[in-house]
Image (cartoon, rainbow, N blue to C red):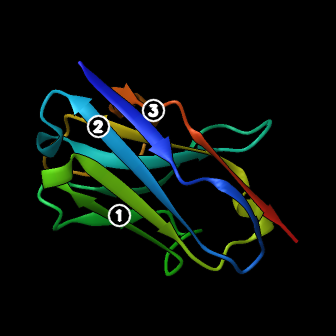
């Protein structure tokens, strides 16, 4: 079993930045692909970014390319999502998740096995 705890969310003005963290405990973090998702009120949960366990293969949703950067530190059992140039439409609860998919970054929530509780990001215009 793996437990995930996100942090780093908050209220920021448009154009600002945040760094989200996801700390894992339990089973070996480094063997999983990490993904970040977000869910806005009334909308489905959507994929934002993912990284394979080796850290050498990343994938981003088109809506965040060039603004979001995913990273991980396997020695610290921690994943990160750097969010720059925030827009009001980025407002959502952000979740980190782990997937056993070792060679391909999956973009559907069903492909992920463990989830954190989420951290709220609110962007004011």
Q: Position of residue 51 (x, y in %)?
A: 27, 57
Q: Nearer the viewer, mark 1 or mark 2?
A: 2
**Answer yes or no: do the residues labelled 1 and 2 have beta carbons within 8 Å?**
no
The correct choice, above or below, for 68 with respect to 3 in the image is below
Q: Secondary structure at mark 1?
A: strand
**Image quarter of the C terminus:** bottom right
44 relative to 106 in the view: left or right: right
- Pointer 1 or 2: first along the chain: 2
Judging depth in this view, the residue of 90 and 22 nearest the camera is 22
Q: Position of residue 44 (x, y in %)?
A: 66, 37
Q: Quadrant of residue 23?
A: top left
Q: Can you identify the residue that label 2 sits on? A: 24
Name the residue located 12 percent from the left edge and 53 percent from the top edge: 75
Q: How many marks?
A: 3
The tag on residue 116 is 3
Q: Quadrant of residue 115?
A: top left
Judging depth in this view, the residue of 55 and 59 nearest the camera is 55
- Pointer 3 or 1: first along the chain: 1
Q: Can you identify the residue that label 1 sits on? A: 59
Q: Position of residue 68 (x, y in %)?
A: 49, 71
Q: Secondary structure at mark 3?
A: loop
- Pointer 3 or 2: first along the chain: 2
Q: Residues within 10 Å of mark 1 (few under 14, many from 20)?
A: some
**Answer yes or no: do the residues labelled 3 and 1 have beta carbons within 8 Å?**
no
The correct choice, above or below, for 46 with respect to 111 in the image is below
Name the residue located 29 percent from the left edge and 37 percent from the top edge: 24
65 relative to 50 in the view: left or right: right
**Image quarter of the N terminus:** top left
């Amino acid at each position: 079993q793996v437990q995930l705890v996100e942090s780093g969310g908050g209220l920021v003005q448009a154009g600002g930045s945040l760094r989200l963290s996801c700390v894992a405990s339990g089973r070996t973090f480094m063997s999983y692909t990490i993904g970040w998702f977000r869910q806005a009120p009334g909308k489905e949960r959507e994929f934002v970014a993912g990284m394979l366990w080796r850290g050498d293969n990343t994938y981003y949703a088109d809506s965040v390319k060039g603004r979001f950067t995913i990273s991980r530190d396997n020695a610290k059992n921690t994943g990160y999502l750097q969010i720059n140039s925030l827009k009001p439409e980025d407002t959502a609860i952000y979740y980190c998740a782990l997937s056993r998919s070792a060679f391909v970054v999956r973009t559907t929530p069903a492909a992920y096995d463990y989830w954190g509780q989420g951290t709220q990001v609110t962007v004011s215009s």
